[in-house]
Image: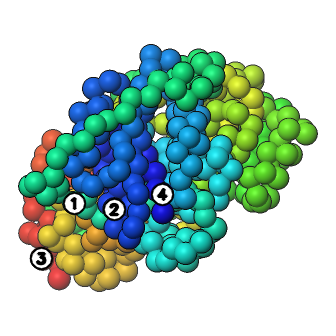
Amino acid sequence: MKIVVCVKPVNEEMNPFDECALECALRIENAEVTVISMGRPSTVNMLKRLTRLGIKRAILLTDPAFAGADTLATSYVLSLAVQKLNPDLIICGRQSVDGDTAQVGPCLAQMLNMPQITNVLSIDHINGEITCTSRMGKESVKLPALITVERIHVLRFPSIRAKTGEVEIWNAKDIAADIARCGLKGSPTRVIKTYEYSAGKRKCKFIQPEELMDVIQQEKTKEKVKIDFKPSEKKFDEVWIVGEEPKDIALSIADKVRVIERQLPENIAALARQYKPKVILWNSDSWGRSNAPRVAALLQTGLCADCTALETDGEKLYMYRPTFGGSLMAKIECITLPQMATVRTTANTQDEIIVAGGRGAKDDFDLLKQFAAKIGASLGASRGLVDLGLASYDMQIGLTGKSVSPKIYLACGIFGSIQHTCAIEQAQTVIAVNKDRNARIFEYADYGIVGEIRNVMERYL
């Protein structure tokens, strides 16, 4: 079996999700594994290290023409390289930790006209088809196919006697690439500006641990206030949404919304070609993140992932999302039509109180569970706790999880990156518990307790 693993360099190291993808490939019996990466010439050092793991080939796609590529242009270059290799299976990490878009895998699958399974938790069987357990359940597709995997394995170390192999270098000419579709030239999404994110900041009142229950009881009695999306001064006449979920945010930028049923990407693309909408919005759930990139590939248009806000001047759509690992917010435009985005929508739950744990709560998560049960709260988690395997994905709150709007959100051991705070903006009251007084979460909390989680929780159990 011939397997291609696509890996991305992030600060000269391999993207953690791609490490899992490579380990998955190496665990498949009798597999010939080829690793390909698109990057600067210095990426060769990362690939050389991987040759000691028993892979058959390592290929670096590098050319000045590839610089500045968005997900569409990146997928195009990768697709040409993969076509030359003609594999039975392509394995990609679910997403990169710097971009967090999860678009390249599905987009690449569409360009190769292959079926896909995304968010894979385990590979169960391969024999003419591949059967996996994903976040959607059991899924099977015929080979050749592409899968994207979660952080389900730790990449092995090379043996002491393993030798370093050669890395092949391919440029645009080697893969017969159309330069107009590569790099910045071929990228329909453009970052207009980046800036420090300040929306959602609150004035934090620090309290003592013994005051926590009084504050919770006080905030529970307050009437819930719905937070609406800020409407643009000018609006589109009409935008399309796939499914009902993005309707509220769509109405902030359009006078009329047309709802398209969830269906095959080919059908949605055909409708778009026929009626030529200016904008198509998708929900940022698993289905939207898997299918919107395929439609983008079919229409050769841009797609901005996980937008937290939208605005328009009546002609152009401006999309806002966290970037650079969550330290900044980016304003992005799409220079092709239709302009497409997956958008964050608030989970439709009746949670009055959510108790959420972060990486800082890894040793105290059982206490948080007990406390949540005692006060009748739901349990949540940051991505850090989910990545550690201590909480399930359906509990994850944040850019790559879900957005929530409870009356009270109690964040314990959560530092408060943009990816997390943008998902709790619609919480009426945020209470943070963290031993680090300088933790960013306090800037987005109404109340704060500085201290060890255990010391705070044990007094109430």
Mark 1 against mark 2, which lies toward the viewer?
Answer: 2
In this rendering, the label closer to the viewer, 4 or 1:
4
Q: Tell which circle, 3 or 1, labels the residue nearer the N-terminal end.
A: 1
Q: Quadrant of residue 287?
A: bottom right
* Amino acid type of the residue that numbered disc 1 sits on in the rendered structure: Arg
Q: Amino acid at mark 2?
A: Leu
Q: Which mark is residue 156?
A: 1
Disc 3 from disc 1: Cα separation: 43 Å
Are the residues flagged by discs 3 and 2 in contact, CB closer than 8 Å? no
Q: Earlier in the sequence, mark 1 or mark 2?
A: 2
Q: Which mark is residue 4?
A: none
Instruction: Name the residue rendered at 27%, 26% in the picture.
Output: 42
* Residue under the image location 51 percent in, 73 percent down: 126
**What amino acid type is highlighted by mark number 3?**
Arg
Taking the spot 43% from the left edge, 60% from the top edge, the residue there is 149
Name the residue tied to disc 2.
26
Query: Tag 4's secondary structure?
Result: strand
Label 3, on which residue? 459
Identified by mark 4, the residue type is Lys
Q: Cα distance, mark 4 to mark 1?
A: 20 Å
Q: Nearer the viewer, residue 202 or 367?
A: 367
- Label for residue 2? 4
Mark 3 or 1: the one toward you: 1
**On the image, which quarter does residue 121 sit in?**
bottom left
Cβ–Cβ below 8 Å for labels 3 and 1? no
C-alpha gap between disc 3 and disc 4: 58 Å
Which secondary structure lies at badge 1? loop
